[in-house]
Amino acid sequence: MSEIKALVAAVATMTLDEVRKVWRERFGEPPPLRSTDLMRRALADRLQQEGSSHPLDKRLAQMAARHRTGSKPTVVGHSFKTGSLLQREWQGERHQVEVVEGGYVWKGQSYKSLSAIAREITGSRWNGPRFFGLREDQA
C-alpha cells in the first residue's frame, strides 16, 4: 500500500505534459482535460484503482526521485505489453504505433525497432525511444 502512496505522491509534482505522457503509456489516450490539477487527480485515482503491479511503476518511482532531487535519470529499457499504443505528433500529424509480439506496427507496416519508425516519420536518423518521449538524457 505504501508503494501506491509513493506513486500518487509522484503524480502530485508532475507537469500536465508528464501526467498525459504517463497516462498514454499506461492507459491509452488521456481524457481531454486542460487542468493540471484535474489530470493529476484522475491519474492518481486510476493508479489507486489498478494497484501497483504495472511495469510503469518503476518509471513513476524514477520520476518521483527526479522531482525530489532535481536530476534527470536516463530511462533505457522499455517493456510494453502487446497491444500498447505509443503516440507522437510530428509536424502537425499524429502518429500511433502499436506494440506487437517481436516489434511494432505503424501505418499497417511491421518494424523491429522504434528507431526505424522514427526514421520513416522524420526522414532522418533518430533514437526511437527518444523520438517517442520514452527516454530522458541527463543534462
Image (tube, grey):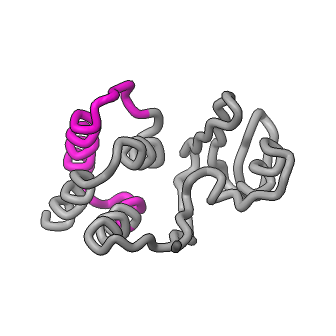
Query: Observer-nearest residue: 124 or 107?
Result: 124
Residue name at image x 31 percent, y 71 percent: 65
Query: Observer-nearest residue: 130 or 53?
Result: 130
Q: Is residue 18 above or below residue 93?
A: below
Residue 34 lies in what quarter of the image? top left
Position of residue 125 measured from the top left corner of the image (x, y, whole percent)? 82, 58
Q: Is residue 45 left or right of residue 62?
A: left
- What is the residue that sits farthest to the top in this orientation? 32
Residue 76 lies in what quarter of the image? bottom right
Query: Observer-nearest residue: 54 or 30?
Result: 30
Q: Is 98 in the magenta?
A: no
Residue name at image x 25 percent, y 59 percent: 10
Q: Is residue 91 left or right of residue 81?
A: right
Q: Is 43 in the magenta?
A: yes
Position of residue 83 measured from the top left corner of the image (x, y, whole percent)? 57, 44
Q: Is residue 60 left or right of residue 81?
A: left
Q: Is residue 2 left or right of residue 46?
A: left
Query: Observer-nearest residue: 128 or 137?
Result: 137
Magenta segment main secondary structure? helix
Position of residue 35 measured from the top left corner of the image (x, y, whole percent)? 28, 31
Q: Is residue 113 above or below residue 65?
A: above
Residue name at image x 45 percent, y 73 percent: 73
Position of residue 1 measured from the top left corner of the image (x, y, whole percent)? 13, 63
Residue name at image x 34 percent, y 48 percent: 15
Q: How many marks?
A: 0
- What is the residue that sits farthest to the front in this orientation? 139
- Residue range in magenta is 30-58
